[in-house]
Amino acid sequence: MSRILGLLAGLAGSVVIALAGPTMVLATEATTAVAAAPIAVPSGVSYELIGRWDVDKLNQILTVDAPKFFSISVPYAPAKNAVRLYRVTYASVVPEKDNKPIVATGLLAVPDTGGTSFPLLSYQHGTVYLKTQVPSFPDESPETQLVLAQFAGQGYVVIGPDYFGMGASTEPEGYGVIGSQQQASLDMLLAARAVLGQMKIATDKFFIGGWSEGGFVTMAFLERLEKVGIKVDGAATASGPADIFSLLSGFLDFPRKNDATWTNVLYILSAFSFENYYGVPGLARTVITDEYYDLARKVYERQPYKIEDLPTDLTKLVRAEYFDPDFFANSAYGKIALATQAYRWIIKTPVRNYYGEADEIVSVGLGKLVMNYQQGIGGGNNKVEAISTGETDHRGTFATAVPHWKEWFDAR
């Protein structure tokens, strides 16, 4: 975070992150409803049971729902056990706002086996249209459903933070705000461990993973975990951009024929989030054209709007000067984007970054960036491996990578 705040100190009032592709709700069988009052944990954390998914439901996700949503058939290991789902509410702080105290939420999923020790996976979610298409509302989150079915249904405890502004949080959305996304992930981990401790459940291994925006957050989270001395047994991403300036510049300066039509949301969410969290009044107005500013604000604030009213042509949404690489790099928006990266440190944890050859968001070069950077340090740091999932698009890369994550984690 300090690298970004340092940049802001030099800006006189004049940001982002990749998305998983704004996702719509995946229809599944209804969750078993369980009414229960929140349970307090001695640390001040609370949690409530929100459902139990049986083996049949988990396997339907793997064999029917996920293939339909992600438009690809992938062989998954079938679920073996039911899963209890809890929404966790915990205290956190906003680093970019002088550690302002806030309340955040996340998901805890526990295998319903009677066991007392499991491996633990922290899953960092991608970008969605609605506040509730996040882990702690799993019925509304297709990506969470797939991770739960493949991991929790095979004996992993799974946790997932809702980033600030998402889930039950009342904050403005902190889309791509690296310090806050690290904080949300770390505090969710600590809260989940407090809850598991009360449940008398131990975790013998710890893994992290994420898709798209969540892939970026996973790498940023890994940096934070390594700095505070929390051991991670393996980290995996799918379609995760580690360098946000490269991501944003690509759509403006070197567009591809297969670029996604919804890249517009990248600039909207990032501009408003950085304006709010870094205290740069009017930043979004310097990025978004006058014609679409009010609509863009509705998108950011998750107010109702017609998606067909949002231009897919970036030259209509983003001000013309940002298509000049020098202007972009020297703007307030561009300088913060330059500092928003999650790969320029000596990585100690084994990492696998999966990328798709036909990904309409994350280019092959960006997908391989972390490995190439680490291997370019002197004799080469070989902790990071970039792995192709073949001719897969953005969603297909994630759906294909998930079982590979599982096989690799199982072997560690």
Image: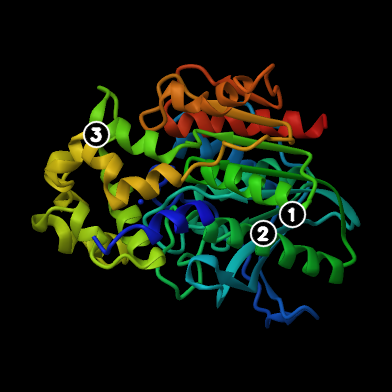
Callout 2–callout 1 Cβ contact below 8 Å:
yes
Residue type beneath disc 2: Leu
User: For residue 186, which numbered disc appears in the image?
Assistant: 2
Determine the secondary structure under disc 3.
helix
Q: Is residue 338 left or right of residue 257?
A: right
Kind of residue at badge 1: Val
Q: From the viewer's perspective, is residue 231 above or below residue 33?
A: above
Residue 88 on image: x %, y %? 66, 70
Residue situated in front as seen by the camera: 243 or 119: 243
Residue beneath disc 3: 325
**Crowd band around label 1 with a 10 angstrom C-alpha radius: few (<14), some (14–19), many (20+):** few
Quote the CA–CA distance across marks 2 and 3: 35 Å
Q: Nearer the viewer, mark 2 or mark 1?
A: 1
- Along the polypeptide, which appears first: circle 2 or circle 1? 2
In the visual, does 306 lie left or right of 406? left
Q: Label for residue 33?
A: none
Quadrant location of residue 378?
A: top right
Q: Residue at x 78, y 69 (%)?
A: 195
| Residue that badge 1 annotates | 228
Q: Measured from the top left, where is residue 279 in percent x and y?
A: 36, 68
Q: Residues within 10 Å of mark 3 (few under 14, many from 20)?
A: few
Camera-nearest residue between 117 and 58: 117
> In the image, is residue 40 above or below residue 192?
below
Residue found 67% across the figure and 19% down from its top: 380
Q: Earlier in the sequence, mark 2 or mark 3?
A: 2
